[in-house]
Amino acid sequence: MKATDSLYRRLITWLLLPLLGLGALMLMQAYRSAHDAADRAFDRLLEAASLAIAEQVKWQDEQLWLDLPPAALEMLATDAEERVFYALYDNHGRFITGNADLPALPGGDDSLRFADTRWHDMTLRVGVRPARLDSWSQRERFEVRVAHTREGRDQLTWSLFTGSASRIALMALLAIAVVLLAIRIALAPLTRLRRAIRHRDPRTLAPLDLPLPRELAELRETLNELLARMRRVRANQERFIGDASHQLRTPLAGLSARAELALRQPEPAAWRSALETIQASSARTARLAVQLLSLTRLNNPEAAPAPSTLDLVAVARDATRDAFAACHRAGIALELDAPDTAIPLAGIDWQLEEALNNLIDNARRYGARHVTVRVQADPPRLQVEDDGPGIPAERRLLMLRPFHRGAETGDGSGLGLAIVDSIARGHGARLTLDDGRHGQGLCVTMTFQGDRA
Amino acid sequence: MKLLLVEDDTLLAETLQDALGLAGYPVSCLTDGNEARERLAGRHDFALILLDLNLPGCSGLEVLATLRSHDADTPVLILTARGAIEDRVRGLDLGADDYLAKPFALDELEARVRALLRRRHPPGAHLQVGPLAFDGLAQRFTLADEPLNLPPREQRLLGCLMRHAGEPVDKAQLAGEAFAEDTVGDNAIEVYVHRLRRRLADSGVELRTIRGLGYLLTES
């Protein structure tokens, strides 16, 4: 869309262009009717002059004879000082008398005919009157041709035309004014909607409530649906923040109380035990803070990074290598079961590594002794299987919700699987939780859609 | 073997200084990014640098870039509160050797420091895994104080595994680090590993195969 595009401009263009076209047509029509009216008026003069001449035609000395009445020609020469011509022709079209050899007009029955012709570089209006002598002895046919130049007619045409043109212009101006006014009135609800949106408090997500015409009401409803979705997202976020602050506050309160208690006790053994508790609890709290941040980032659709082509095997190898030392120190056997060939996939490598880290970490924290990271092709699949206590089938879905912990005794934060779930959804992967191979432990699988990059 | 710690949080800095000092590594401590950059712009005698990324003055990544512009060898371990692996990749791209996200356990930090120092061991350093020891000066292995005589290739393989003790090393890495000059196939490596494993049997040190990750030299 161009920056200059506007509804107002579109309406003006599409209403005024046809209006201008119509105005031009009306002007043409006005000119034509002025022309016709002028011709009709002046043709009466030609008719009268030709009649006056025809009445003076006599039979004398065995031929036609014309005694030209001066008034007949004077009536053709108006104020515009046209040049006037007349001629008399006999039955066979022979020139008898006149001041010019005027051209004949096609047609040839008994009626009076008029036409414009070019003659000696002049535009003439010619009138031809067929007639016959009216005496008892002679009924000879003859033809009277009269003509004059068009100056008077053009003058009349022009004055008639300018009169109607000014009326048309006035009407056009009125029409334009009405169109502009109508557009402004029709677009007024749009302006109201814009003002209503602009004057809103940016923090409020309340629905827009203002009366609007039907077409804009649909837009308002769409906006309100969007606002409703945003309200739900915000409610979710607020609940999450509430949960998070509760989750952070509880261990902090515990830390503080434990330290206070230890300070009241005189025996170093009590201090030692308190310090051990404090160390474990603060490590857990710090990890919780990291996971909260990570989950918030994952759930922010604005900050979704673009996927690139990665090798699932390399991602799994890196993640497993990273987790190896910690597992080894904790006495947990960590293995990677992956094919030798690369498995290409469109994804975000650090997110997939984070998902694997969380799954391995969960297994470690919930008492697994043996953890296997497995990569499979067709369809591409990442799997982390452990031999820990597992999760009962009916509770597995709940585990994907933040702050739902499996075993109450474990020292997990309840966010690990929520993070994995977010990452799986971001990759369009299906996340499944099953029993481990030998009926014990947990096996978490991310199955990616077949679209291998 | 002096270490440099660049960390602006005084509680963490003092704690790490004490902990690493107790582990036998004297630590100098800097709290400002610009100070650290000046200190590392020229010659220095630190064996390892622990670098925070969020520093007052200039960022840890800039300090790292300054160091790497003239010194490609000194190992750098990044410590940061930015947990995402995304940031780690950036640090490693700039030439850091390892990365530890805060919060971390002290023993994790000590293990990483030990691993980094071992990897960059100067010729002549002494390496020890359980009863197995390597005297770098004499280029000799001893097992429970008894000399362990090995053919040259097995010696190079065991040296490489000792430098990476505690972490799995895969065949490609072994081929590159232990046998850089001559081409050694995967099958040959398996044969050497098999022989080494027999020599180390019941000695308190074992050479495990970690599925998918490689070989691990560890105390039993």
Image (spheres, rainbow, N blue to C red):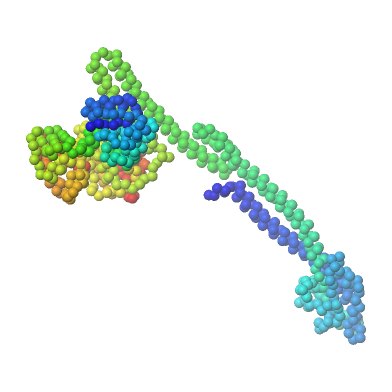
Relative to A181, does residue B42 appear above or below in the rendering?
A: above
Q: Nearer the viewer, residue B216 or A175?
A: B216
Image coordinates for residue A258, horizontal then vertical, percent: 30, 19
Relative to A452, does residue A318 appear above or below in the rendering?
A: above
Q: Nearer the viewer, residue A203 or A44?
A: A203
In the rendered structure, the answer to whether residue A111 lies left or right of residue A218 reads right
Residue A266 can be seen, yes or no: yes
Q: What is the quadrant of residue A334 in the picture?
A: top left
Q: What is the quadrant of residue B218 in the picture?
A: top left
Image coordinates for residue A119, horizontal then vertical, percent: 78, 75
Q: Nearer the viewer, residue A172 or A354?
A: A354
In the rendered structure, the answer to whether residue A106 lies left or right of residue B90 reads right
Image coordinates for residue A438, horizontal then vertical, percent: 20, 38
Q: What is the quadrant of residue B170 in the picture?
A: top left
- Report the number of discs: 0
Figure quadrant of the C terminus of chain B: top left
Identified at 30% across, 31% down, the residue is: B5
Relative to B63, does residue B191 appear above or below in the rendering?
A: below
Identified at 34% across, 43% down, the residue is: A348
Residue B211 can be seen, yes or no: no
Figure quadrant of the N terminus of chain B: top left
As drawn, the residue found furthest toward the bottom would be: A62
In the rendered structure, the answer to whether residue A219 lies left or right of residue A362 reads right
As drawn, the residue found furthest toward the front would be: B43
Relative to B77, does residue A61 appear above or below in the rendering?
A: below
In the rendered structure, the answer to whether residue A124 lies left or right of residue A299 reads right
